[in-house]
Amino acid sequence: MAKTTVVVVDDSALVRSILTEIINRQPDMQCIGAASDPLAAREMIRNLNPDVITLDVEMPKMDGLDFLQRLMRLRPMPVVMVSTLTERGAEVTLKALELGAVDFVAKPKIGVADGIRALAQDITDKIRIAAKAQIRRLHAPTAAPAAATGGATPPLKPASPIASLGRLSTEKIIFIGASTGGTEATKDVLINLPADCPAVCITQHMPPGFTRSYAARLDGLCKIRVKEAQDGERILPGHGYIAPGGMHFSVERSGANYIARVQDGDPVNRHKPSVEVLFNSAARVVGQNALGIMLTGMGADGAKAMKTMKDAGSYNLVQDEATCVVFGMPREAINAGAADEVLPLQQIATRLIERLRSTAGMSLNRV
């Protein structure tokens, strides 16, 4: 079997050395080049034609985002970003995912053995996924990469996003699970939901330090309010709740209200947060008032729990293969018998609203 070839792009000689060693230890991949800046990387990519590149977020001579934007327009290929654990690093990483990067890994502190081991597992897993991902050319120029938090002025929020909701709509909750490619897929669903839609609970596989920036970015782009979930808070219509990185997120009932439960614990299906945890709570607590959505991602996290949701009466939409970056989690959900409909990403929000109108008698404002 041919090895996956990788070019590493990082301005730190030590990081280049560590990543090269990690990659070359794998029997199925090989680092064929290591560049210290995007200009050198451009020549390596042209001459060596790698299957995947790893790209540092902040680079000399040419900003990493500038380089990524040009690459995805002119020669689209799988890119895994290597990001710093800072607020700035998180914001730039989210912009990189918007520009077409498949995924990212958080750069550990050099010299911390546990961090290097975690990086080795994370980066090699994501290189394997990236090598098989569906890559799309970036057509239209986007906002300047420096505008890492979303660019244009965000839309105005309604003064009271829950004012037009009736009793039935407060019972409904939308549950979304996603992994690789899911930051953009989830955004594409949420920006098309009206301000008075039911609450949306989301588990997106993300490490600690990134979900706060992700929630803030979505909040600036969407009609609904979006935030990191906090333990014990009420789950309200017109709001989206993101599972904090490194914590499990579930929903519980407290009298007439739904509340968020955010807890530490062992990984489930190797993930924390885990879609399985959120979807199992949807089946147990929300039942037929739940609507499930499974978006792009690698693996099977959440597939069994989504079938449990369906058995409890939920209606489930699953993203189709043609629009997924990685068809792993949706495929497993379909194979488990969890899907009521399999749809292109661009149709999911519309179909969701139609389903809500037809089943709950909701008076949702049109998008």
Image (cartoon, rainbow, N blue to C red):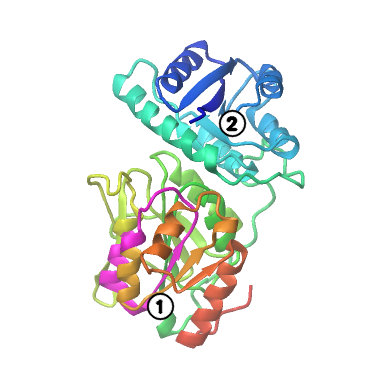
- Packing grade of label 1 (10 A; few <14, some 14-19, many >=20) is many
Element under disc 1: helix
Residue 116 picture location, percent across and down: 36, 22
Q: Reply yes or no: does residue 148 show up in magenta.
A: no
- Packing grade of label 2 (10 A; few <14, some 14-19, many >=20) is many
Q: Residue at x 38, y 69 (%)?
A: 337
Q: Residue at x 56, y 51 (%)?
A: 184
Residue 103 picture location, percent across and down: 51, 39
Q: Residue at x 59, y 64 (%)?
A: 344
- Quarter of the figure with the C terminus: bottom right
- Disc nearer the start of the sequence (1/2): 2
Residues shaded magenta? 278-304
Above or below for 87 versus 254: above
Label 1, label 2: how far apart the Cα atoms are: 48 Å
Label 2 is placed on what type of residue? Asp
Seen as rendered, the residue at the extreme top is 13
Between residue 256 and residue 24, name the one nearer to us. 24
Q: Which residue is mark 2?
A: 51
Q: Nearer the viewer, mark 1 or mark 2?
A: 2
- Per the rendering, the mark at residue 170 is 1
Between residue 269 and residue 279, name the one nearer to us. 269
| Residue 157 left/right relative to 266 | right
Above or below for 256 versus 94: below
Between residue 289 and residue 197, name the one nearer to us. 289
Tell me if residue 340 can be seen: yes
